[in-house]
Structures are given as structure tokens and as C-alpha cells.
Image (cartoon, rainbow, N blue to C red):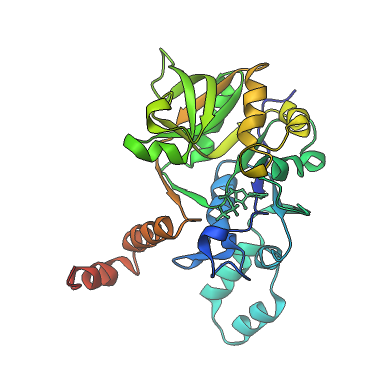
Amino acid sequence: MSKQVRIAVFPAGGLGTRFLPATKVIPKEMLALVDKPVIQYGVEEAVASGIEHIIIVTGRGKGAMEDHFDHSFELDAALARKGKHELLAVSRGVSSLAQISYVRQKEPLGLGHAVLCAKNLVGDEPFAVLLPDDVIDAEVPCLKQMMGVFDERDGAVLAAQTVEGEGISAYGVLAGSEDPDNWRIFNCTGMVEKPKFADAPSKLAIVGRYILTPRIFELLAETKPGAGGEIQLTDGIKALLKEEKVFGYIIDGKRYDVGDKFGMLQATVEFALKRGDLGPPFRAYLKGLAL
Ligand code: UTP
């Protein structure tokens, strides 16, 4: 089996209920973080990491994503006619970002089920999974960091971050031990989904980036619905752990959960402040608020 990770799967078939009413009609992956749809950040991260083929798992009412990454002839023609060349380059840039295939998840039966929907398109090779609503701001793209670990170790790699205190209960949490050679690597022996603070086996929470081996597909096909009646990716990975090595990797970067209203607000403020064009006036505006 090739060790090269060429394919990235973006599960985007969920209902996005935490962001209602905005997500009643608009897919949450298409909500704008400053001026770009959330999913574009992940696609750009994958491309910058060397991914050659992107698979987006969509669902009912999610067609806007396909239109976004396609050519927009009317828009491009109008921009060309008006001499708006910079904006034309932005529009064309999006449609030529990557080679993207789409597969429908007919019912949102869970993240594990969404990944399983990509089985035939992925085939028999290792692949990455990026959850579009986890936006990761990092100097070296997060997925690229993980590919480095996958290259040098023999096993799946799960992105993780340290979460102090009670907040850990919102995540899947890794059990295992720190690697003696590299503090960012964690040798996993298990994982617990949303544990009580007192029962958490570590402070390491799984975040939305994974490099998996194709064996996961067979295991997911056998996985019964778990928490919330959904087929959980973590249950599939727990089964994988019995057969193959699995590593946690403490990412070097900051992760925002933009599928959550508060996380989106945090990311919006921080990403806007970093922008050359918006940062200075936005900073001045924030300073003027009587907080
Ligand atoms: P989330 O739990 O964050 O997404 O799943 P959700 O279910 O859409 O959101 P809420 O909780 O109702 O607000 C993480 C990722 O997995 C995808 C989601 O689209 C999201 O990117 N997902 C989830 C699927 O593709 N299919 C599913 O059946 C469930």
C-alpha cells in the first residue's frame, strides 16, 4: 500500500443544527468566515498540503458547494466586461483550486457513515479526512504537519489539541502515552467520546483532521450506530486501534469550531484582525466600543 496521502475527504452532509436558523437553507460549510465560505479554508489547507484529489460528501440542500467550486460564467463575464480583473482572478481562482468529486450521503446517519460514503472514490489507499467546520490557522498547514508524522510512523494519525478543565467533556479524548521522542506525538491505546471531566483519560481532545488507512472502511461498514443513534467515526477508529497503530498529533496552530456560533465569532474577529486590508480599521473600531 502506498504511503502517500493523495486524497482528502470532506464530510459535509450534516444538518448544522447548532447554527440554525442560518443553516435552514444555506449549508453551514458555505457560511462566510470574513469573506470566504468555511469549506474553502479546508480545501486550501488540503491543496497547500499536497492533496491531489478532494472528495466532498454532500447531502440534500448542499448544492451551493458544487456551484461555489465550479466556473461561474455569468459572474466571470460580468467582471471581465467591467474590467474588474482582481475580482475575476478571485472568482477563477476558486474554480481552479482543486480537482473535486462529490458523493451524496442520502441521510445524515453520522460522521462515520459520511466517511464510508467516500469508500468507492477513495479505493485502497490512505486518505485524509478534514471536517470543514474546524478551521485551523497554522503557519505550516495542519494536514501537512500530520502527513509528516504519517510518513515517518506506521499508522493512522489523529489531530489533537490540549483542553484544560471541564471543556474536555465536549470532545473525543485520547487514551495512551506521550511518545518518548516527540512530545507532539501520542501513542494511542484507546479513546473515549465526550467523557465526564473526572473520567477523561488525558487532556488530549481529537479535532477535525485525520489520516486513516483504507481498513477503516471495512470497520465502519460493521460499525453499529452509537451515540445519538449515529454511526460514529470514533467507533470505527476504536476498532482500527485493535489492528493497527494509531497516533495522536498535537497540532501546531489554532483551531476554531466555526460550526458553533461562539467559535464562528472568535474566528471572525481574529481572522479579520489579521487581514492587511480590514485589520487596522477593525482594530480601531473594536477599541472604540464601550466594552
Ligand atoms: P457535526 O456534528 O459538527 O455536524 O459533524 P452537524 O451534525 O452538521 O452539526 P450540528 O451538530 O447539527 O450543528 C462534523 C462534520 O461531519 C459532517 C458535518 O457536515 C460536519 O462537517 N457530518 C455529520 C456528515 O457529513 N454527515 C453526518 O451524518 C453527520
| Residue at x 67%, y 43% (from the top left corner) | 230
| Residue at x 65%, y 16% (from the top left corner) | 242
Q: Report x, y in % for residue 279.
A: 30, 65
**82 with respect to 214 (left or right):** left
Quadrant of the rendering where the C terminus is positioned: bottom left
Q: Report x, y in % for residue 283.
A: 25, 67
Quadrant of the rendering where the N terminus is positioned: top right
Q: How many marks?
A: 0
Can residue 88 be seen here?
A: yes
Res. 21 image quadrant: bottom right
**57 with respect to 147 (left or right):** right
| Residue at x 43%, y 35% (from the top left corner) | 251
Which residue appears farthest toward the right when viewing the image?
Answer: 120
**266 with respect to 126 (left or right):** left
Res. 196 image quadrant: top left
Can residue 212 be seen here?
A: no
Is 207 placed above or below 291 here?
Answer: above
Which residue appears farthest toward the top when viewing the image?
Answer: 180
Is 200 placed above or below 49 here?
Answer: above
- Residue closer to the observer: 45 or 162: 162
Q: Report x, y in % for residue 145.
A: 49, 34
